Amino acid sequence: MSLSPCSDLLVIAREHKATFLSAKWRTDESGQEEMTLSVTWSGTLSAEEGECICSVICIPLASQKRSSTGRPDWTCVVVGFSSGYVRFYTESGVLLLAQLLHEDPVLQLKCRTYEIPRHSGVTEQHEELSILYPAALVTIDGFSLFQSLRACRNQVARAAAAGSDVIQPPPLAYKKWGLQDMDTITDHSSIGITTLSVFDQMKNASMLGGFHASVKGSPPAMSQYITVGGGPYTGFYYAIEGSSQPLLSHVALAVASKLTSALFSAASGWLGWKSKNEEESVQKQKPKVEPATALPVRFGLPDSRRHGESICLSPCNTMAGVTDDFGRVTLLDVARGIAIRMWKGYRDAQLGWVQVSEARGERDLATSPSMPRRHAQFLVIYAPRRGILEVWGTQHGPRVGAFTVGKHCRLLYAGHRLMGVNSVTSQGWQIHTQQVCLFDPVNGALRAVTIPFHLALSDKKSERAKDMHLLRRLTTLLRSREVEPGLLESEAQSVLLDIKHPAIKKQALESLLSNKNAPVSCLTNVTRALLASLKEQDPEAVDESLLQFCSSQLKLLQLYTDVQLLHTPDTSPTEPEHPSFSGIEEDLARVGPVLQRYTEMNSRPCVSFAQDSSGPLPVRTFLSQLEWVNGELRVIKQPDTDWTQLGSFLFWGCLSGQSPLQRVCETLQESGISPQQLLSLLLSVWLNKEKDVLKYSDAVSHLGTLLSTLSSMKGAVDESWDGQCVSPWWQQVRTACVQSESAAAALLAALVAHRVAKNAITRLGESKFQEEWECVSLELEQWVVCIKQLEDVLALQTLLCLPSPQGSTGGAVTRCSVKTLLESGRGGVADCVSKLIFRQGVSPDLLRDILQRRGENEPLQQGGEEKLEELLECVCQRFPDSLSPDVLFAHCSWENVVQWNKDPEVGQYLEWSVEFLKMISNPHIQFGVSAMMWQTFIVKRFSAAAFLMEKVGKAPKDRLCRRDVGMGDAAVRSFLSSSVQLLQALMEVSSSSFLPSFPFFSRADSAVEQVSAPDVCVEEVWGGAEGPVSIMELALDQRSVHYPLVQHHCVLASLLHAAMTFSLRLKPLSLFDSKGKNAFFRDLSSIQLLPSGDMDHNLVAVRQEFLMNVLTGWVKVLAESEENGVKHSSTEDMWPSVCMELSSILQVNTDILRRHLVCELYNQGLDLRAEEVMMEVQDKDVLGSQLLVLTGQRLAFSLLHSQSQTKPNMELLARLPPTLCTWLKAMDPSELRCPSAPLSQSSRLINKVIEMLPENHGQYSLALHLLEAVDSLHEEP
């Protein structure tokens, strides 16, 4: 079993199977989030027959990204097998690399990673992976391993993405040492590079080489390895760096030859990956194992009967713990090679180390801040036989902790951190790694061992350690829920008095005061006792900050107790009624109807939560929101909810009439809170508890009494104030009301404050002038403006609170205040109302009727619309300029097009937007809004639709429309229709003729030039509005458009609309020459070069064919609707006139289209409509010839192709002239869409033909014969 040091991957392996578990967050039943380890991969890892897993280790690899903060990029799982193979896997079980390093079972895998040196004297160690075999030790350099693993992982990912085979990477470079002079080896530790002192170097030289041994000038750098086992019990090995490295011998030559062949054989990949054929041939042959370089043991700890089982190196590389088969744990000094401590009675023990750094601020202030932080080493021993986990301080420290755990647990200690970290990349990182964890297989829990630094400072007599112990004892007591108040008080008092250190004493008192279960009496008594003990001590020895803290908290607790007693119903004596303020009843009567409507709108039930219920304010919340600063009690700045909670505790009893007003105000004044902060708290609770305020009828008078009392406090109103300047005190009230979104509460507060201020000014004037003069002051003028604004906002907010119909869109109810309206510019009011009108689904016609009936007292019959009309009329009366009809129509048009842009599938939004636009009476406004709509929302989708139809050559299907235009085909049809209407409106407002639909004529005098531009006006009290530019102002700033260019786009829009309506084939841009194409989708105000003169005949022919197809499609739709009995709308009947207008613009002969339409109508059997159109045809001769053929087709169907051929019909056919009979047989009645037309219609048609044809016409005689035949057939019974 192996756990990653980052605790995000756990690997469990047995024999040839393994399971990988990764960390994931999940929410338990109580709603708490916790980290769990769940299985992400499981399977078989052994590749060769008979091999099993011997050792496993998880190595997290650091991220190379600059934004990394110390989290691993990924984790590599290294597995050692009994065959000698070492294989490297990803977290998902993908094999990255496999190499046979020795032909013996792998005993142990250990890793050494980079540690930040604690001071300059510590040698920086290189990263390394060490693999222990029974008689050999293999080490792999960490840097090269890190690069190889990253390259392998990238290559595997690329191969998986491309679906190709993974190319075998070249082998890893390594060193192999043959460990000699030990009988058995079970475990090892790689200490790293060490350098001896000169004395130790001379001592070793004389002992090894004798009296005449020579000593080198500088001590050599050596790699130190320690092994445990038997004979000797512990062995110390030293490999001198640079003397006999295996890489410089035949191993290096073998690896180099492999690398060279790989580089020359493969053309792609990193470091020359092998080709597939070579890989297969290599796999068939067993890899060659390089021999080890002999490394003799330098010295050891001989103990013939003792056999070592495991060794665990400390994080600082100075100590190591060794377990043996005698149940002992031995502590080794690595540098000196001696045993310095031994524990007994720990059979089958498992070891781990915890290194703890000293926290900042725990050192003496006299210590230099540049000194390195101290570190403490703790040895963790798990004794499974006894089921106990112990923590010991080293080297000779006491046992600082012991925990009873299960007997089947596993102590997981990685002994390394992230690989790939160095002195440069680690700067600023917070490397998150757990050092020691205990895994309990019974309940599946994984617990980390955390040790505070102070446990290493000294023994049990340490005052600081004792204080920390007392603090933990108090914390444990406070966490327990079922504690009697008396026991809590006595325990807390004894703990606080026993703690010596002032900082810890203050921390303990803060923990007690912030506890939610401690009663106020307990807190008061404990704080008083602590303050008394501090005062009894020597003043010079007492910490001044602690004394002040205790004193201030005791005052706050006393204030809390006093206020709580005043709000208790039993202690509130009856007080005399305070006289009502003069004039307040008149104000309330004036705003009463609006207040009543507002209350009705806001009385709907709403969702509330249990934790939001207004209970008594907890004492810890009270203490956290107040503080003493320089002898003055101040409220800590918090969000509005916290101010409201504190304000409710202080004032709600007064406002609801349950508490004595004067005594509460006197208590608060004596407490030292400034009147300004008390005023803020009072206004906060009044404005944020609007629904509760409106329930109490006497709340207004209570508010007046409170305001009057607070304003009479010392320091509230400046004594030098004379009424002719603005008072900061009353300005604070106005600012709060202006910023509040509770419209009714703000208005009531302003009315009450106005009356209190007016009374104060009146008293001031009487005392100054001693006569009955009416005071006129700047202060009262400010109040008049403020109240007028608040009344306007209340009426507007009442309208905005109107409930939306079910299923409507447009968002939640808009909340507004005076401040938001002033900051929303001159169009803020109209913007709010237009959003409401959209949310209510009010159609343009209905809004126009409501505005026209204003003042006529003729409400609609339906309840919801009647309420809307009533509220809208009230708001329009208060905002006559901001909500004039043109302004409202403009904003409604803009709001609908904005909502359509969000959801283009709802074509009605755009249709209503254009209808609202047409209702604007002022041409300047209508022109500006239409130009902005086109440029902002329409032209982009319009051009996309045109290019799409040009690309596919026909009306596009739904999928293509959604892809290119962003809406379905039905929505595109509606969009094009609205685009035509918009461009038509833009042309109409640019032309004084105000022509009917589709005014494709030359531009006359502009209507914009005939009417003067309006001024954007607002009401007097709202003249200070500043903010974004309104729609009206933007509309009036629009540049004039180039009329022919608008007409040019309108023609294109009509063509696109026709093609989508009748599903015709069309390449719309191909109907125009290069000039026409280049002019499309340009800014309408620009002057473009448009087509002029005669158009190419081929282009005209294509245009004519398309318009004829449009007429044909319209006739088919007309016939289908008449057959189904559906009534036609005026928009459907406009297509013939549209085509005629288009023909005049597109240089198509209009008479040809009319003749085609007549023929199509007769073809469809719509003879009466055809006769109406026939009157406008100019060339009667050609039309007569066309209709003669159509009459012949009808007669041929009746005589020759009818299913019920009667004998009289056959006789009539025999009597016909031969020429007529031959002509009839040549007719093809299948071309007729309605061949079975009544004979009366055919007779009428042939009479019309004879009227049109001159007597000298070549087909005149044929027409006469045809008339006789039809009459004869008609006369048959």
Image (tube, grey):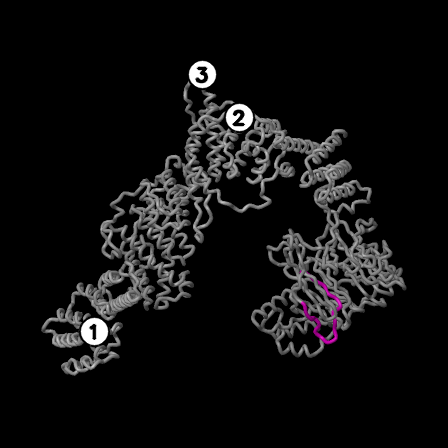
**Badges 1 and 2: C-beta atoms under 8 Å apart?**
no
Q: Residue at x 52, y 46 (%)?
A: 606
How many neighbours does mark 3 have within 10 angstroms: few (below 14), some (14-19), or many (20 or more)? few
Q: Which residue position is annotated with label 1?
A: 1190
Residue 411 at x, y percent in the picture: 76, 58
Q: Amino acid at mark 1?
A: Leu
Disc on the earlier residue, 3 or 2: 2
Q: Over which residues does the magenta segment extend?
A: 42-60
Give the labeled residue for mark 2.
Answer: 577
The residue at the point 76 percent across, 71 percent down is: 82
Query: Element under label 3?
Result: loop
- Camera-nearest label, 1 or 2: 2
Task: State the SS at label 1.
Answer: helix
| Residue 1080: x %, y % from top left | 32, 59
Q: What's the residue at 23%, 80% (across, down)?
A: 1205
Q: Quadrant of residue 643?
A: top right
How far from the left and from the top, in percent, is residue 1176?
Answer: 18, 63
Question: Left or right: 611 with respect to 347?
Answer: left
Above or below for 773 versus 153: above
